[in-house]
């Protein structure tokens, strides 16, 4: 039987939905990847009795309870009291933590307010988890057979504390964990239902690796989590699964791990020594914002002209006014002229353009909301793709920008076929 | 005693952290605003016994249990079985729902696979919640004294189902709810600790309105939730609190409700009939992307030149090469020249520019990572702000773009003093 964990979030702001609980998901992912079975998450408010109850319940079901929140200096922050009661021990002042908190205030040129002393109170016998990112230390205390760990709710503080202190503590517990290895594949441009259909045979609930799909911002990610007795075995299982899925899904796969569409495009530009210039209408700067999120892109990304108005299309990009008047700004001809115009004015290898109708108004039967033309110009050739997106203005713009980046990716991959991401096998 | 609710999320993908549970926060916020007290959230995996247990536990603590997830057509989707067991009734086929599911497949040119029939199985005696956005219907069933409602986990389907069907059902229950009115203020450019200090006296745990702070992407939101016997009383309490907080916080307040920095800037441009052109270096298109998120901005937003390279700054904006060589691209002089250059080339009323060091590399003691100059040029005047941001590349770029928009907002508000958002009182 593998080690079991319960994740507990404490705080009115999470309970009432003022904050989306990203801590719980982050912890669940980390614990799962350590081979710990997460049994459930629970969220309770800033109420000492409710929290105590939840801690007792959790401690009865799991080897480790990982709690966050309620360690601040105000009277609402009752987590330490609740844990002490659940563990049936008194709170004690931890002098080293007082010194740490005072020191943090001093570094910001302030004196520690008296009320912050409460943050150094710990259940008797607790192991202190020092906070490298903020004032409130966390702690671990025994509660029956379980270990109850509590960390601050501020994600930055919590993540550092987990990785630096709590994860090693959990790893050292003499309780069996599964050995898990996770691989990820990312795709763009293939409908989720088709991805599902193509790899359904890999997705049985009992399969190893366990395969799951997640869609976020139009990008589909395939997660493959392999369990085995040794890390090497798990890793080899996960990689084999990943490669099999990648072979089936083909060109739609743009990367693995932490790759994004824009990081992959940036890497391809660099590998081929190609420069790009962009002209955006409906995407309004999103393509530029994506590409410039990559550090060091300035050698390959020359300029981006957001030509929202027709004047700008004519003035900046040299799109002939007659074309706009004849076929309209949202047209194949204008997309081609924009891509060529920006390529020439910047002296880039590749010119990329978008023009479309992001909505919510401005559509017509002929040119509906969601229609977007993407132009790709090189010295040899100009190609325009006619695309149709469904959704809100925000969704249409985001997907159009990603589709444009994907078109660049596919283009750069054809320069040296098989140059994109491909299975290691 | 007010109506109590438990929120239940069912699914391995939430339990294991593959998905951040935004449904729970959304439901918690909606229920709170309806005057329902949310007691706790719980997340369990795709396990019939665990789900049944969780439903029983929840039903014993609350008047209404709102569950999401596990209504798909696969063998992992066990929520309906778990609810039927907790309610101690058998599952029955709901013919109308079969017809609805078949119809949805037909509309997409497909035949309903046999396995989707399971989605029309309901606990006996359940009230069906039709799904206007997808295949799986939800349902409400009695479980002891509580009502247990279950909806699909897909946020779009869940939200429509809640607003259209479940919220009216809850509103009609003969159980007392608190009467709540929520107002929100949004601020930019004031540190959270200072906001906290300034309105701490309004933030007591027992205050009415109950005041809470939330920080997201550098924007601080003050939420004021007032409870009263009548809606009019609650609304007046919430507005009074909002106005008091706004008076204290002053110019940093840019809006209320669903306002964003860019929607407020767009509205001010429209009100004053002013046009804007943008030249971005370190923000790489983000300002353009923010502004063009507002429908109908094309009359006021003329163009945006993302001049990432020095060549582009010289070629597109006419920044004198000597200045770049003498003081560097990240400098007050270049920010001024960029803002003036883009204003003149576009013939805009306002020219806005950014140049800075987003990192992670490229900093120096003199010009550290996070240093950003924002230029604002009009026909009368050019002003440059020297700003310093801390964080990752992503954070620095985002905050710099928002700071630039905020500078435009403050500028436009000075055209007609008191023209920004101000208390209604």
Image (cartoon, coloured by chain):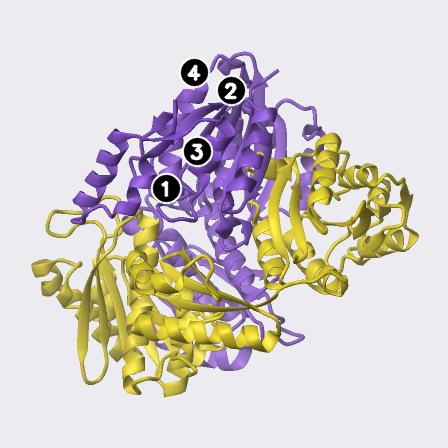
Chain colours: A purple, B yellow
Q: Tell me how far mark 1 sits from mark 4, CA to CA.
A: 24 Å
Query: Upstream in the sequence, badge 3 or badge 4?
Result: 3
For mark 3, give the secondary structure. Answer: strand
Q: Disc 3 is attached to a residue of which chain?
A: A
Query: Residue tagged by mark 1?
Result: A156
Tell me if mark 3 has few (under 14), some (14-19) or many (20+) residues whose alpha carbon lies within 10 angstroms of its own. Answer: many
Q: Which quarter shows the C terminus of chain B?
A: bottom left
Q: Tell me how far mark 3 sits from mark 2, CA to CA.
A: 31 Å
The residue lying at 29 percent from left, 76 percent from top is B410
Query: Upstream in the sequence, badge 3 or badge 2?
Result: 3
Decide: marks 1, 2 in contact (CB < 8 A)?
Answer: no
Residue A157 shown left or right of residue B211 in the figure: left
Q: Is residue B212 above or below residue B75?
A: below
Q: Tell me how far mark 3 sits from mark 1, CA to CA.
A: 15 Å
Residue extending furthest toward the left: B326
| Residue A150 marker | 3
For mark 4, give the secondary structure. Answer: helix
Using the rendered image, report if marks 3 and 1 lie on a common chain.
yes
Q: Disc 1 is attached to a residue of which chain?
A: A
Decide: marks 3, 2 in contact (CB < 8 A)?
Answer: no
Q: Which quarter shows the N terminus of chain B?
A: bottom right
Query: Upstream in the sequence, badge 1 or badge 2?
Result: 1
Query: Upstream in the sequence, badge 3 or badge 1?
Result: 3
């Amino acid at each position: 039987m593998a080690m079991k964990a319960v994740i507990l979030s404490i705080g009115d702001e999470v309970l009432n939905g003022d904050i989306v609980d990203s801590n719980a998901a982050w912890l669940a992912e980390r614990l799962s990847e350590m081979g710990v079975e997460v049994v459930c998450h629970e969220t309770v408010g800033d109420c000492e009795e409710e929290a105590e109850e939840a801690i007792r319940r959790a401690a009865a079901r799991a080897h480790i309870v990982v709690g966050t929140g309620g360690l601040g200096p105000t009277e609402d922050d009752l987590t330490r009291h609740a844990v002490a009661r659940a563990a049936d021990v008194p709170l004690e002042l931890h002098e080293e933590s007082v010194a740490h908190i005072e020191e943090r205030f001093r570094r910001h040129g302030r004196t520690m307010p008296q009320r912050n002393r409460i943050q150094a109170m710990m259940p008797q016998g607790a192991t202190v988890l020092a906070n490298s990112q903020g004032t409130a230390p966390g702690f671990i205390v025994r509660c029956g057979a379980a270990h109850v760990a509590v960390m601050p709710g501020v994600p930055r503080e919590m993540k550092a504390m987990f990785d630096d202190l709590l994860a090693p503590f959990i790893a050292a517990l003499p309780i069996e964990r599964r050995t898990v290895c996770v691989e990820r594949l990312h795709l763009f441009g293939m409908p989720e239902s088709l991805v599902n259909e193509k790899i359904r045979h890999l997705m049985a609930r009992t399969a190893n690796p366990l395969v799951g799909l997640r869609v976020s911002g139009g990008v589909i990610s395939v997660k493959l989590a392999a369990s085995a007795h040794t890390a090497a075995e798990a890793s080899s299982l996960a990689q084999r699964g990943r490669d099999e899925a990648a072979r089936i899904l083909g060109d739609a796969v743009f990367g693995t791990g932490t790759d994004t569409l824009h990081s992959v495009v940036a890497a391809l530009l660099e590998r081929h020594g190609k420069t790009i210039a962009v002209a955006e209408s409906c995407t309004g700067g999103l393509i530029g914002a994506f590409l410039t999120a990559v550090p060091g892109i300035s050698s390959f990304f020359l300029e981006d002209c957001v030509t929202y108005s027709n004047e700008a299309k004519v003035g900046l990009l040299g799109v002939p006014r007659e074309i706009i008047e004849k076929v309209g700004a949202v047209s194949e001809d204008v997309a081609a002229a924009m891509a060529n115009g920006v390529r020439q004015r910047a002296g880039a290898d590749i010119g990329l353009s978008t023009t479309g109708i992001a909505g919510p108004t401005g559509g017509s039967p002929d040119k509906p909301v969601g229609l977007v033309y993407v132009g790709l110009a090189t010295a040899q050739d100009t190609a325009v793709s006619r695309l149709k997106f469904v959704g809100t203005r925000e969704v249409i713009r985001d997907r159009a920008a990603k589709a444009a980046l994907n078109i660049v990716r596919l283009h750069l991959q054809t320069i040296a076929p098989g140059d994109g991401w491909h299975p290691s096998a």
